[in-house]
Image (cartoon, rainbow, N blue to C red):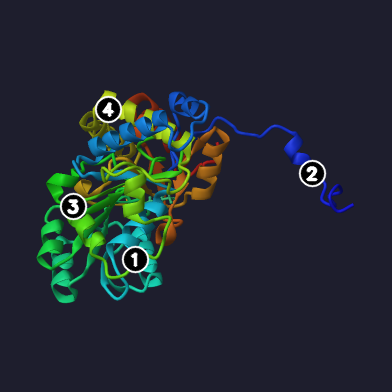
Amino acid sequence: SLRRMSSIPPPECLFKEMNIPNRQLFGPGPSTMPPIIGSSQAQPLLGHLHPEFVEIMSQVRLGLQYVFKTRNAYTFAVSGTGHAGMEAAILNLAERGETLLVAKAGIWGQRAADLGRRLGLKVEVVEVGDGEVVPVSSIEEAAKRVKPAVIFVCHGESSTGIVQPLEGLSKIAHDNGGLILVDTVASLGGAPFDMDALGVDCVYSATQKVLNAPPGLAPISFSDRAIQKIKNRKERVASFYFDALELGNYWGCDGEMRRYHHTAPISTVYALREALAIVAKKGIDNLIEQHIENASALYSQLGEAGMSMFVEKKENRLPCLHTIKVPEGVDWKAVQSNLFGQGIEVAGGLGATMGKIFRVGTFGQNSEPAKAKDVVNKFIQMSSPGDNGEK
Ligand code: PMP
């Protein structure tokens, strides 16, 4: 009968074990996860409003305030990957018909612009060529002209490997009546960032890059100015799931009694808590310094091997994700697949940089000198022109 018989047989593959090789993730993310973070996910589940879990959420908030360098009350993690942070930020900060000014240096600016258009915002874009940073003067000129409600910049543009200068941007946003929003998905912990000193109104990030945690949460923080704007919206945010005030209540940011908003991904929150503990013990500034020193060593290592960085100016390079020109006569796909065969992931370009560059991420623990050096050596061996990575 209908109640008993399924005409769909159970999939054979599910009777076997999953195949998960132990791969070193040196691409643009996710990065290799330390066992201590992984094992936290095997801990028993708690309910999403149990006092012990609420305590862990508070610890995560304190850890995020520490890494973002902010005292903002509305500092928490959105359930979802980096994109969820982007959606939550733009949805809450801007209202239909307002202007979003995007500083575009690669695909992440492009993505923010696309999202803005989907949300019915007027989108203005200031763009530069791949491998360049957007000059602050161009952002200022555009802001004066279009009076944006929000200015979007991507701090670490992972498609090209630049780190976008942020100094002066909050003043430009505020002087023109708007807010400054920064994507730090690929840069948080791997390049200097100080939310409060920079006067940033909203920042979001992700867990699977420098933090070495599994993907699934988007750390986010809103300044008081941003929260005021959100509280004074004419229309409600067109998403329940991403409503910053609702999320903030659930995360204990508003001092009111916590209401159920959604079921937090409990195990992923444990993992983020452990990842933040590693950063707290090491010190955020030491972590950033480790990436900078490692990057410097890597530039010399690659330079000695005759390879060139894609981003010309050293000061514009993101210290945790390195973009390297594919040498003449080298088949980048062969290099990538040969390294893959050795259990190491590095990536090719993304969007317009596809085929032109390699992207090597040394996020978090992957930036420990010995580990990074070893992987870069293998990468250099594979990428020497002439052998086409065929060794
Ligand atoms: N912004 C930047 C700068 C990124 O590098 C990425 C991920 N590569 C994202 C946003 C999107 O994050 P996710 O893939 O976690 O949704």
Mark nearer the viewer, 1 or 4: 1
Residue pointed to by mark 3: 224
What type is the residue that disc 4 sits on?
A: Ala
* Residue 236 or residue 163, whichever sits in front: 236
Does label 1 point to a residue whose CB lies under 8 Å from ligand 1? no
Q: Secondary structure at mark 1?
A: loop
Q: Position of residue 14 (x, y in %)?
A: 73, 38
Does label 2 point to a residue whose CB lies under 8 Å from ligand 1? no
Estimate how packed mark 3 is, as few (under 14), some (14 to 19) or many (20 or more) residues with alpha carbons within 10 Å.
some
Q: Tell me, yes or no, if residue 190 can be seen here.
A: yes
**How far is the residue under mark 1 from the one under mark 4?**
37 Å
Residue pointed to by mark 2: 10
| In the image, residue 82 above or below residue 174 | above
What type is the residue that disc 2 sits on?
A: Pro
Look at 30% across and 48% down and name the residue there.
184
Mark closest to the chain's N terminus, 2 or 4:
2
Tell me whether the residue at label 1 lies in contact with that at label 3, contact meaning CB atoms closer than 8 angstroms.
no
Residue pointed to by mark 1: 236
Residue pointed to by mark 4: 280
Q: Secondary structure at mark 3?
A: helix
